[in-house]
Image (cartoon, helix red, strand yellow):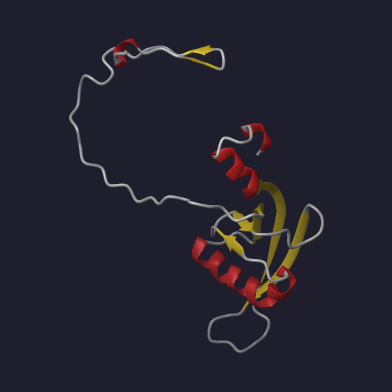
């Protein structure tokens, strides 16, 4: 089948062919940084929307996050929580009850031994979950995508 005559029916939608597709340009060498995933752990990943107030630059948000871990680490119940530095966090378990949790964090002033500092509020809202066992079954084509 030639590339220029390609058309497919995907979920009832007719895809238009692109005239001249694949006839111009030149081959290139492409290096890809990737790795093969041979297995997935058997747990659920929880995704949270994170709102930090007052709004500060990303570098300060990372400092506030460090203080959050230091001040509230015990409430994470031994779970690993990763933060993208902007607005999303992921954990390998749900670390609070309900859909929303608010934490108060104090960022110490630089060069000060005072326990006070700048107050911040971090609000976690449950956004999504991803069952890695179901994902592994999907990748093995043993369950439909709707199950994920």
Q: Name the image quarter holding the C terminus.
A: top right
Please tell me which residue lies in front, 141 or 33: 141
Above or below — where is 66 with respect to 53?
below
Residue that sits furthest to the left in the current view: 26
Horizontal placement of 124 versus 97: left or right? left
Counting labels gives 0
Residue that sits furthest to the bottom in the current view: 113
Task: Return the x and y of residue 3 as percentages of the image width and height.
Answer: 30, 16
* Residue depicted at 66% across the width and 61% down the height: 53
Task: Return the x and y of residue 117 as percentages of the image width and height.
Answer: 64, 78
Above or below — where is 105 with respect to 147?
below
Please tell me which residue lies in front, 103 or 23: 23
Task: Return the x and y of residue 46 as percentages of the image width and height.
Answer: 67, 53
* Residue depicted at 62% across the width and 49% down the height: 132
Horizontal placement of 135 versus 59: left or right? right
Horizontal placement of 94 versus 140: left or right? right
Tell me if I can see residue 74 in this picture: yes
Q: Name the image quarter holding the N terminus.
A: top left
Residue 51 quadrant:
bottom right
* Residue depicted at 27% across the width and 47% down the height: 31
Task: Return the x and y of residue 48 as percentages of the image width and height.
Answer: 66, 53
């Amino acid at each position: 089948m030639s590339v220029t005559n390609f058309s497919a029916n995907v979920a009832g939608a007719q895809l238009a062919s692109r005239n001249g597709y694949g006839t111009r340009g030149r081959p290139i060498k492409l290096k890809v940084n990737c790795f093969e995933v041979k297995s997935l752990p058997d747990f659920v990943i929880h995704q949270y929307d994170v709102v930090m107030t007052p709004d500060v630059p990303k570098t300060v948000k990372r400092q506030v996050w460090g203080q959050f871990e230091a001040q509230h680490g015990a409430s994470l119940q031994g779970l690993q929580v990763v933060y993208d530095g902007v607005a999303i966090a992921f954990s390998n378990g749900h670390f609070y009850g309900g859909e929303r949790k608010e934490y108060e964090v104090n960022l110490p002033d630089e060069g000060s031994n005072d326990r006070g500092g700048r107050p911040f509020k971090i609000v976690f809202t449950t956004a999504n979950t991803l069952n890695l066992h179901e994902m592994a079954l999907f990748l093995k084509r043993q369950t439909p995508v709707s199950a994920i």
